[in-house]
Amino acid sequence: MGYGRVSTRDQNPDSQRDALTEAGCDRIFVDKASGKVDRRPELDKALDYLRPGDTFVITRLSRAARSLRHLLDLAAQLREREVDLLVLKQGIDTSTPGGRLQFHMFGAFDEFLRELIVEGTLEGLASARARGRVGGGRPAVLDAHGVEMARALYEMKGDHGERRYTVQQIADRLGVSRATIYRHLNSDKAVSA
């Protein structure tokens, strides 16, 4: 039995699905949800489908668990139901004593890394707020004058009513990317389809 998860609607689960198929999974369930989300309907379906003697296969520990506590609860549930866990990318196989030990070590390490990332993000946001910037992020590439210039160049017409400058030409002239120009023009709904 295989299970995969991608965190956003835009991510593609094909690589996980391919790895699970190659590992010999008869059925594969995939959720599209953030790792922090409690509700994972496909994980619930996969767990309901499992029978004693089955192997629950995932590509990484982080695909199935939200936290170390959740991971340990999942492992206990699988063990109670006589279902083994196989984690492909981390080489964990709970059908062996070494695999069970490795499972617990990797789970603790994964949670530690997640907590470090969250801690670093919170420190960065606090530092930005202390400097008067709310929400962090990069400073604006174009100031108000640059935005006005971009808008004026974009709206300039040629002899036959066509646009005199392309977005690329405006970006080159102002020394920014096309995406920056589009972002500023779209914020005023100035760009027509």
Image (cartoon, grey):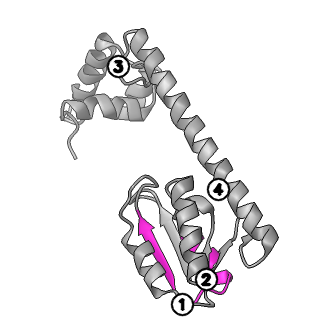
For discs 1 and 3, the disc positioned in front in the rendered view: 1
Q: Which of the two residues, 41 or 72, is positioned nearer the viewer here?
A: 72
Quick one: SS at disc 3?
loop
Location of residue 187 (image quadrant) = top left
Whether the residues at callouts 4 and 1 have beta carbons within 8 Å, the answer is no
Residue type, numbered disc 4 = Gly
Of callouts 4 and 2, the N-terminal one: 2
Q: Identify the mark nearer the N-term, 4 or 1.
A: 1
In this rendering, the answer to whether 55 lies above or below 142 is below
Cβ atoms at labels 2 and 1 below 8 Å apart: yes
Quickly name the residue at label 1. Answer: 51
Question: What's drawn in magenta, residue-wise?
Answer: 12-32
Identify which residue is drawn at 70% across, 63% down: 103
* Residue behind mark 4: 107
**Three-letter code for the amino acid on which mark 1 is drawn:** Arg
Task: Give whichever of discs 2 and 3 has the lower sequence position.
Answer: 2
Answer with the quarter of the image where residue 159 lies.
top left
Task: Find residue 134 and name its label.
Answer: 3
Closer to viewer: mark 2 or mark 3: 2
Question: Residue most toward the right?
Answer: 98
Rendered image quadrant of residue 41: bottom left
Residue 86, visible in the rendered structure: yes
Mark 2, residue position: 83
Q: Position of residue 7 (x, y in %)?
A: 45, 57
Residue 174 horizontal side relative to residue 110, left or right: left
Disc 1 on helix, strand or loop? loop
Q: Amino acid at mark 2?
A: Val
| Label number found at residue 70 | none
* In this picture, residue 107 sits left or right of residue 160: right
Residue at the image position 25 percent from the left and 35 percent from the top:
186
